Image (cartoon, coloured by chain):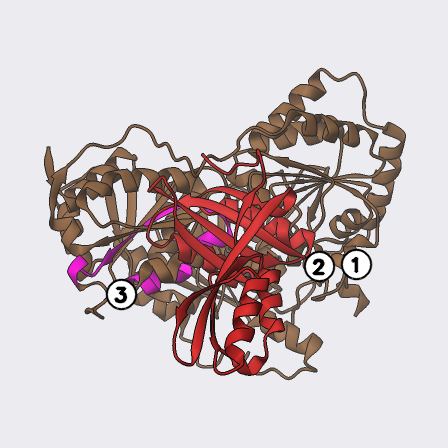
Chain colours: A red, B brown
Amino acid sequence: MKHIISILMENEAGALSRVAGLFSARAYNIESLTVAPTEDATLSRMTIVTSGSDDVIEQIIKQLNKLIDVVKVLDLNDGRFIERELMLVKVKATGSFRDEMKRMCDIFRGRIIDVADGSYTIELTGSGSKLDAFLEALDKAVILETVRTGASGIGRGDRILKL
Amino acid sequence: MELSGAEIVIRCLQEENVKYVFGYPGGAVLNIYDEIFKQDKFKHILVRHEQAAVHAADAYSRATGQVGVALVTSGPGATNAITGIATAHMDSIPMVIISGQAPTPAIGLDAFQEVDMIGISRPCVKHNFLVKDVKDIAPTIKKAFFIAATGRPGPVVVDIPKDITAHLGHYEYPKSVEMRSYTPILKGHSGQIKKAIKLMLEAKRPMLYTGGGVVLGDAADQLIKLAHRLGFPVTNTLMGLGGYPATDKQFVGMLGMHGTLEANMAMQNCDVLVAVGARFDDRVIGNPQHFYNKDRTIVHIDVDPSSISKRVKVDVPIVGHVQSVLAEMNELLDAETRTPDAAALKAWWTQIEEWRGRNCLTYNRNSEIIKPQFVIEKLWEVTKGDAYVTSDVGQHQMWAAQYYKFDKPRRWINSGGLGTMGVGLPYAMGVQFADPSAKVACVTGEGSIQMNIQELSTCKQFHLPIKVVLLNNRYLGMVRQWQQFFYENRYSESYMDSLPDFVKLAESYGHVGMNIEKPADVEGALTEAFNLTDRFVFMNFITDQNENVFPMVPNGKGLSEIILAEDL
């Protein structure tokens, strides 16, 4: 099953490679990984999307906690949470496609952030599955380029990951 | 007070009460070596290869419980140290390894003797640090010792660029360490401990299975107390030998791939298994699916949460320092009115004695060729069971583990997890420094000893009275054994040709060499060697080439699918 794991870690050189190295050394999956500093400049927050059986996820959480630079680990799937990912898609927009693309973008509540003679660049946020759905709804031939940030996640309501 | 980075390194090591630093100089650590020259608070032991420096420091730690310290230069010095570091990591040995690094401005420019030590060592250390400012040296070394020695211990690398060791900086050694990201759990959960006690008291076929954690956690006394109070059988892993006295009647021997029949059968057939500082690894329980065929309730005490439910699902996990958890169990049992089920226990012991009665460690005692097992038995007799025994890796290691009855912890020094050939001689050096008057035997093979044989020179320099017990069968014995059993006798590259004359080799370093070719000479040679209390003696025992290690649980098989010598 897919899990989203949030990690608070010391904002130090090499911390990212410790996490990435752990996943490759122990043959765990990484679907996506994002990392950025938090409002506390000494801490980074990382979000990892991974998958595995309950036993594997339990080991992943334990192994992450064992890393000296890791301060806190939370499996967002243990409770209610919100997942968001940002995607930029450059699509062909010529002739009748121009209106069609605008409509598709509106349906998925995207925004066109760059307009050129032959293309639009669309910005879309949502869960990973929503972004997947948007791409599936498009004709493959019109997609010129895509870039995705990987998921970020946060617990709902009182679920807070902080020091 | 302004000091150079190199002086700060030395002060920090003195502050940590380091007695010995095992190392090898080179360009990037010249400033540090210059400061070593000027001080006499700790001794530097010059080895002949960096791998041996790390192994010796590792063994010093295994024998004393203190943090072992090694010092190597950048580049090849650092990469040579890696095997030693990985060996210590697999067996959870507390160490600090200081490596030199190219000067800060040169890092990343493929400088002479530059290697990314942080990147290379990352998968085989507990943690590592690159020091980028002279003011960080003291706090970093303080943290390194703290991390190495606490929680589940392990090696920590501190990589210091050469320019940092020359820079001047203010020196003050921190009194304590606070790390928000690292707070090892010491005390076990009381509720879980009570649950475990209840299970143990209700058990019909209980079993204590204990590992290296008991030795490293100095918990042998608490384990003995617990086992004697409950009357349960005890087995040790390879790493756990000495954690429970081997001559005690409740001891059923080592378990696992080359464990005794009684230990493996009891492990498979028990109804309540209490695992203490052990990790159910593949050489211990064999095939996990086969292990699951029998129902049992498992209590697992370990300082490392990630060791619990890793290979085998556990019913009652207890995360904590094994010494503290066992002490709490003993206290609870002091106040306990219930007692173990005596009738069930009696029946269980009857069953175990039946397995024990098969004498799974018998071998041909009337052989005209020296049997390796016989040498180990005589070694035990001659040293009155009170020596430190280091070993290399292979058949001789298993025979030493099976036939030398270790009654005390920290006496059996070997590479269990990584299985590193070549550790034996440098391990013996580290142990001899830890206890200069002790009897130290290095049980080895002609393959393993040649992997660090250059250390005969170090032994000469420091007058180390180590006794090498070479079980020379002219084969990479364990490889040959597997080829015989599983590769239809195709002995691919497992024969050792062109061996040196070990006696002459030893003598060329000023040591004593002996060739022993007859069983009748074994005891005399050992006695003579150990009587030479101030000499390094190299005993070359010409042993039976065809002897195999039994019992054996073949790879991928279950514990009760064990093969005995008599089965073949």
Label pair 2/1, CB-CB below 8 angstroms:
yes
- B80 horizontally vs B375: left or right: left
Query: Disc 2: which chain?
Result: B
* SS category of the residue bearing label 3: loop
- Percent x, y of residue B39: 15, 41
Marks 1/3: CA–CA distance:
46 Å
From the image, tell me which residue sits under label 1: B290
Start-end of magenta stretch = B77-105
Against B264, residue A115 (above or below) is: below
Q: Which mark is residue B286?
A: 2
Query: Disc 1: which chain?
Result: B
Marks 3/2: CA–CA distance:
39 Å
Query: Disc 3: which chain?
Result: B
Of pointers 1 and 3, the one earlier in the residue sequence: 3
**Residue at coordinates 58% horizontally, 52% vertically from top-left?**
A4
Observer-nearest of B199 and A142: A142
Against B561, residue B190 (above or below) is: above
Does mark 1 fall on the same chain as mark 2? yes
- B83 horizontally vs B215: left or right: left
Of pointers 3 and 2, the one earlier in the residue sequence: 3
From the image, tell me which residue sits under label 3: B75
* SS category of the residue bearing label 2: loop
Which of the two marks, 3 or 2, is nearer to us in this view?
Answer: 3
